[in-house]
Image (cartoon, grey):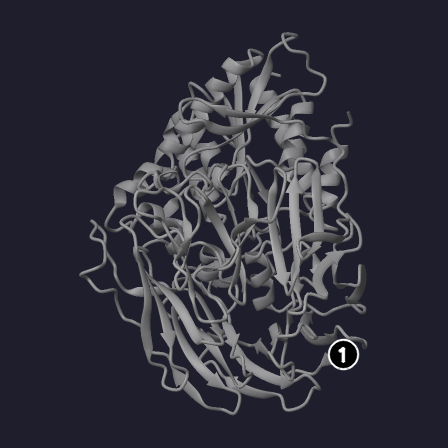
């Protein structure tokens, strides 16, 4: 096959993400479904679409040359790993009649019941606009200030102004967006009269400066980055009324020592706002301690700002939150995530009804509540995720069928089932549980068809995918082996679904490799003990699992040549790839490490302290797992790749590691990517990078 055809397609389609519908919203009556999607699999411009009465139509999109994206919006998109432009996010009123979105800093609204999009004049570039529940107002952030304007464009007014350049109202800080998954910073009250607003002060956070060496005339960006062991941003909460009133929320200072788990490193101060909302019962928030062992779910009195404890969670290692939980039904009944006594998977407890999810059902996400109905995703097999529903009368019911990774959006009696299966990607509209239509997935079909062998390898039954060349006949000759895992927290590659990474795995196989992907300890889907077995050491057990899977795969397929083994990866798996050739040169003979966090003291507080603790108290954990101090062990070919505009894993990781390798006299290759961030999808970069990796690994293995 043409070795360059697939890489070009991979880059042109932004990892086959273009043309894929996403961000579904279903109206409360179930009649309308909103979503964003580009027109085709190679179209990078997303538009806002409406599915109604069995057909779909464009509601809004770019109307010419949009202006520059505001810096706060650029950062929000980077945190969300957004690869397209145009309408990439939106919000609606309660009835999904009024939709607000931003284009190049301009605020636009459009109605789902007719009429053309309308530009609303604002006081400055608008970020994260959100209509009030009654559809009469739109709140937005500009210059760190929270403002509100009528949907008719009148009465724009300031609600909360930053006291200085280090303060913002209504935006998520770096840790919240990157490590906690909270991308928003304000929430409307149901009566549209007030908002619950996060105030973020970064004055105490150290500043790092990121510039592009390829553009020396441009000043570097100042980034408040809370590295492990350093100060976090201060997040406080406020109730801000549309009429101008304001109340500060009383934040808890520290967890009760009597109930806070003891440890060598203990910090009970509540420094993290995990999530917040405002429903018919009132405003609420979930806050977490710096050491991540205690969380308080708290009710907020919107009149006084006083708080009361609703629920407490604690864990001796760290708390792993289920996205969307805790939540509340319309009657105010809490929906709580918990690990049952003697159990090993995250479950749900419907507090008022006393119901708990069936034993062994691993809950992945709470999607939403509809009255007393709770929609969530879960699975009892690590490689599958299904959509489930709970209602007091009918109990727990699985809504999705067939192997795959399924999720959903819902409103009224309508469920939009978004399914990735071994056969591809489909979006099905269900009404009263029966299919009534489909929303088109316009992504391109990959030029290579993934044909993985699904395996459970070794004593730990490591879930793995093995890709072999389509032209290879068993016993016809040995194949060099390429490990291409992620193997880190929060991500699974080994699922029963066709995805961009399975297409990439098959492409590598067609170039003459046996390709192995393995989800080992630390990855989700296998239970609490599995995920938390990396506590204190994020490298050794992860690397051991990759080695064990490799040897077990070689027993399964005798054509794997264990004398020619390479490993490649990006971000966590880039770190793993570099660690593999440092610590196990007896197994791994070459590596490509992209965007690798090589000095773990340089990564953010919440993500790194979760696993390794505070570097000032537990320095041995960072010394064991960081790669810089082990640079002198390198004896195998290693290519380091890094985007020079990466503000997640900063280029300093690659530069410090390269400097340590040079000081130790260890030859290695360095490939800087000017202008690239953490997610590399640009044409002319993502495609060429695959080909350069191929050339490097073939030469390194003597293929």
Residue 28's x, y, as percent? 64, 69
**Is disc 1 placed on a helix, strand or loop?**
strand
Q: Is residue 624 left or right of residue 263?
A: right
Q: Residue at the far left: name it.
A: 258
Can residue 666 be seen here? Answer: no
Task: Determine which residue is flagged by label 1.
Answer: 118
Q: Residue at the far front: name it.
A: 393
**Residue drawn at 67 percent across, 90 percent down:** 154
Q: Is residue 110 left or right of residue 391?
A: right
**Residue drawn at 59 percent across, 56 percent down:** 216
Residue 418's x, y, as percent? 65, 50
Residue 675 higher or lower than 662, as above or below: below
Query: Quarter-wise, where is residue 237 in the image?
Result: bottom left
Query: Quarter-wise, where is residue 30 in the image?
Result: bottom right
Nearest the viewer among 138 and 637 is: 138
Nearest the viewer among 328 and 456 is: 328
**Residue drawn at 73 percent across, 45 percent down:** 13
Q: How many marks?
A: 1
Can residue 174 be seen here? Answer: yes
Residue 665's x, y, as percent? 41, 29
**Residue drawn at 46 percent across, 42 percent down:** 524
Residue 640's x, y, as percent? 52, 36
Nearest the viewer among 211 and 264 is: 264
């Amino acid at each position: 096959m043409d070795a360059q055809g697939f890489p070009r397609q991979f880059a042109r389609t932004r990892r086959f993400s273009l043309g894929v519908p996403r961000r579904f919203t279903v109206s409360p009556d179930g009649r309308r479904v909103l979503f964003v999607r580009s027109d085709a699999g190679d179209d990078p411009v997303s538009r806002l679409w409406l599915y109604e009465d069995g057909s779909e139509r464009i509601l809004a999109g770019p109307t010419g040359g949009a202006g520059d994206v505001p810096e706060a919006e650029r950062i929000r998109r980077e945190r969300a790993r957004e690869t397209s432009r145009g309408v990439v996010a939106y919000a609606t009123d309660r009835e999904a009649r009024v939709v607000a979105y931003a284009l190049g800093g301009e605020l636009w609204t459009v109605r789902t019941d007719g009429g053309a999009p309308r530009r609303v004049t604002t006081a400055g570039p608008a970020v994260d606009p959100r209509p009030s529940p009654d559809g009469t107002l739109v709140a937005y952030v500009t210059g760190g200030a929270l403002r509100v304007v009528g949907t008719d464009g009148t009465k724009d007014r300031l609600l909360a102004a930053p006291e200085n350049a280090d303060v913002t109202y209504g935006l998520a800080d770096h840790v919240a967006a990157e490590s906690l998954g909270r991308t928003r910073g304000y929430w409307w009250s149901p009566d549209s009269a007030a908002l619950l607003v996060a105030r973020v002060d970064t004055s105490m956070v150290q500043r790092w400066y990121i510039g592009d060496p390829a553009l020396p005339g441009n000043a570097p960006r100042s980034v408040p980055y809370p590295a492990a062991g350093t100060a976090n941003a201060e997040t406080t909460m406020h109730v801000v009324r549309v009429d101008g009133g304001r109340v500060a929320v009383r934040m808890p200072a520290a967890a009760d020592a009597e109930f806070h788990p003891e440890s060598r490193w203990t910090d009970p101060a509540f420094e993290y706002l995990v999530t917040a909302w405002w429903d018919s019962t009132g405003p609420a928030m979930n806050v977490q301690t710096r050491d991540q062992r205690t969380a308080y779910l708290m009710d907020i009195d919107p009149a006084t700002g006083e708080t009361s404890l609703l629920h407490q969670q604690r864990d001796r290692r760290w708390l792993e939150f289920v996205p969307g939980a805790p939540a509340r039904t319309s009657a105010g009944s809490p929906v709580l995530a918990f690990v049952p006594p003697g159990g090993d998977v995250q479950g749900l407890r419907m507090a008022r009804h006393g119901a708990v999810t069936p034993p062994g059902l691993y809950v992945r996400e709470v999607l939403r509540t509809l009255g007393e109905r709770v929609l969530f995703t879960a699975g009892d097999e690590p490689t599958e995720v299904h959509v489930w529903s709970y209602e007091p009368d009918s109990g727990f019911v699985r809504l999705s069928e067939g192997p795959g990774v399924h999720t959903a959006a819902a409103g009224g009696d309508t469920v939009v089932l978004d399914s990735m299966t071994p056969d591809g990607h489909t979006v099905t509209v269900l009404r009263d549980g029966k299919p009534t239509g489909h929303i088109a997935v316009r992504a391109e079909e990959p030029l290579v068809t993934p044909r993985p062998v699904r395996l459970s390898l070794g004593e730990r039954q490591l879930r793995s995918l093995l890709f072999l060349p389509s032209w290879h006949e068993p016993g016809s000759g040995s194949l060099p082996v390429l490990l291409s895992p992620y193997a880190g927290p929060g991500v699974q590659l080994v699922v029963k679904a066709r995805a961009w990474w399975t297409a990439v795995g098959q492409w590598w196989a067609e170039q003459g490799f046996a390709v192995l992907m393995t989800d080992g300890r630390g990855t989700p889907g296998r239970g609490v003990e599995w995920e938390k077995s990396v506590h204190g050491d994020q490298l050794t057990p992860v690397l051991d699992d990759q080695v064990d899977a490799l040897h077990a795969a070689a027993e399964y397929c005798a054509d794997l040549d264990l004398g020619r083994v390479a490993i490649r990866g990006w971000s966590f798996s880039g770190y793993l790839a570099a660690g593999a050739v440092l610590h196990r040169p007896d197994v791994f003979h070459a590596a490509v490490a992209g965007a690798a966090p090589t000095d773990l003291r340089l990564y953010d507080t919440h993500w790194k302290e979760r696993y390794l603790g505070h570097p000032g108290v537990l320095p041995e954990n960072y010394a064991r797992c960081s790669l810089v101090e082990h640079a002198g062990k390198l004896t195998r070919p290693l290519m380091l790749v890094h985007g020079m505009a990466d503000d997640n894993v900063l280029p300093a990781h690659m530069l410090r590691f390269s400097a340590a390798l040079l000081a130790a006299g260890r030859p290695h290759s360095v490939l800087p990517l000017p202008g690239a961030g953490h997610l590399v999808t640009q044409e002319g970069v993502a495609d060429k990078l695959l080909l350069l990796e191929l050339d490097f690994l073939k030469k390194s293995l003597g293929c």
